[in-house]
């Protein structure tokens, strides 16, 4: 199955979708540093050539050139909806959801997968969130010139309320996921908007959590042992992965092996109120973009004995699930942490992508069965 991706960043979502069986036709990314990272790792990302990377503003791309697409994916800037950003939603000039909607309308993919910050689900964004979802549901119902978004929302809601028949609409599922629950050594929460074109009628099953907070897991196991009650929905879950679990086998700093892996850190890590780093034997807090993180502190390890250290480039990459052959050659520590802090955890992207791929295959199988029955009836 093929895909196109908007706001590709350093390629975390791309890597996960590749693991799920999607082959990227194009990646759109304006930032020069991200573009360089994508080109440097083109083979690893499954790109067919340098022309697959469109390093330009997404607003300049005509998506009608990509009509035969299985999946449109992307992670538009999260700052308009994040706690670290201004959180001003539709009033933020970085809000790129209108471009996501335009891309869906122009290329008509079989499915879309959009990732954003958990702040998108905040009560203060409820009305605009509804507007985003309704536009994605009915992408061909376009706002009139000069029409306010609230007026447009009213027309979109009327389509739903009155069962207006449109050639194409999308059935949408909203997922709120914690990466740690899916085998990522990081308690990073995210929102995924997954949509399927209405003519496909796929069978959608959301990804199942594979890991759980150890304290909750131990408490449930104790309850099961005491009462004999069955707990089938969680019996196969493993404890959350810790930082130690994913970095313990890295070579010692300063060795040729460490340098070859870009296992490079920097001095000066220190805690301060509200920003105390991540305990070594727990999942990392959500990595943040920036030199010290935004608001800071999340990009360091707390070893529990008064010792703190910034994550190395390779440690941060492993926390995000990037493979060891992903290259940061020539990239500074601060730039690498920024690239990684803005990325979607690879394993989480893979889990959601696998569920999307399975649903698409179910829709194709249903369409094939319908065709066969019609042929037999004829």
Image (tube, grey):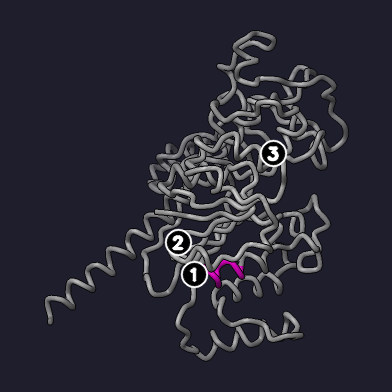
Location of residue 118 (image quadrant): bottom right
Residues rendered magenta in the picture: 101-107
Say which label, 3 or 2, has the lower sequence index.
2
Q: Residue at x 73, y 21 (%)?
A: 265
Q: Quadrant of the C terminus?
A: bottom left
Q: Bin the neighbour count of mark 2 within 10 Å (Cα to Cα): few under 14, some 14-19, many 20 and up.
A: some
Which residue has dot 2 on it?
Answer: 69
Q: Secondary structure at mark 1?
A: loop
Say which label, 1 or 2, has the lower sequence index.
2
Q: Is residue 217 left or right of residue 313?
A: left
Q: CA distance from mark 3 to mark 2?
A: 27 Å
Q: Secondary structure at mark 2?
A: loop
Given contact means CB atoms under 8 Å apart, are the residues at marks 1 and 2 in contact?
yes
Residue 270, horizontal then vertical, whole percent: 84, 25
Query: How many numbered discs, if any?
Result: 3
Q: Is residue 95 left or right of residue 114?
A: right
Residue 286, horizontal then vertical, whole percent: 69, 40
- Between 266 and 175, the one lying in front of the other is 266
Q: Residue at x 41, y 58 (%)?
A: 205
- In the displayed structure, 257 sits above or below 292; it is above
The residue mark sitting in front, 3 or 1, is 1
Q: Is residue 308 left or right of residue 41?
A: right
Q: CA distance from mark 1 to mark 2?
A: 8 Å
Q: Bin the neighbour count of mark 3 within 10 Å (Cα to Cα): few under 14, some 14-19, many 20 and up.
A: many
- In the displayed structure, 125 sits above or below 216; it is below
- Name the residue at the bottom extreme: 162
Q: Secondary structure at mark 3?
A: helix
Given contact means CB atoms under 8 Å apart, are the residues at marks 3 and 2 in contact?
no
Residue 315, horizontal then vertical, whole percent: 64, 26
Which residue has dot 1 on it?
Answer: 108
Which residue has dot 3 on it?
Answer: 339
């Amino acid at each position: 199955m093929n895909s196109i991706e908007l706001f590709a960043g350093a390629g975390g979502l791309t890597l996960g979708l590749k693991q799920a069986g999607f082959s990227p036709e194009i990646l759109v990314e304006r930032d020069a540093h991200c573009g360089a990272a994508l080109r440097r790792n083109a083979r690893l990302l499954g790109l067919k050539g340098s022309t697959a990377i469109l390093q330009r503003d997404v607003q300049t791309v005509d998506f009608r050139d990509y009509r035969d697409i299985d999946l449109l994916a992307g992670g538009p800037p999260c700052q308009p909806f994040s706690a670290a950003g201004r959180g001003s939603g539709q009033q933020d000039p970085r809000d790129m959801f209108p471009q996501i909607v335009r891309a869906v309308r122009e290329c008509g993919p079989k499915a879309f997968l959009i990732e954003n910050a958990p702040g998108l689900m905040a009560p203060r964004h409820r009305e605009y969130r509804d507007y985003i979802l309704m536009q994605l549901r009915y992408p061909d119902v376009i706002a009139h010139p000069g029409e306010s978004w609230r007026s447009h929302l009213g027309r979109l809601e009327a389509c739903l309320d009155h069962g207006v028949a449109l050639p194409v609409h999308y059935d949408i599922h909203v997922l709120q996921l914690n990466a740690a629950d899916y085998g990522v050594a990081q308690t990073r929460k995210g929102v995924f908007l997954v949509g399927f074109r209405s003519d496909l009628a796929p069978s959608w099953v959301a990804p199942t959590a594979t890991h759980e907070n150890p304290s909750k897991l131990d408490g449930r196991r104790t309850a099961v042992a005491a009462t004999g009650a069955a707990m089938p929905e969680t019996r196969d879950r493993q404890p959350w992965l810790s930082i130690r679990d994913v970095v313990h086998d890295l070579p010692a700093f300063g060795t040729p092996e460490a340098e070859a892996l870009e296992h490079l850190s920097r001095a000066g890590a220190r805690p301060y109120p509200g920003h105390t780093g991540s305990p070594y034997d727990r999942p990392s807090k959500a990595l943040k973009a920036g030199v010290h993180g935004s608001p800071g502190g999340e990009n360091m390890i707390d070893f529990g004995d008064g010792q703190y250290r910034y994550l190395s480039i390779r440690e941060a990459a492993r926390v995000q699930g990037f493979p060891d052959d992903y290259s940061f050659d020539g990239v500074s520590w601060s730039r690498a942490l920024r690239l990684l802090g803005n990325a979607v955890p690879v394993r989480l992207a893979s889990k959601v992508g696998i569920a999307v791929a399975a649903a698409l295959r179910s829709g194709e199988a249903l369409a094939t069965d319908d065709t066969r029955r019609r042929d037999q009836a004829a």
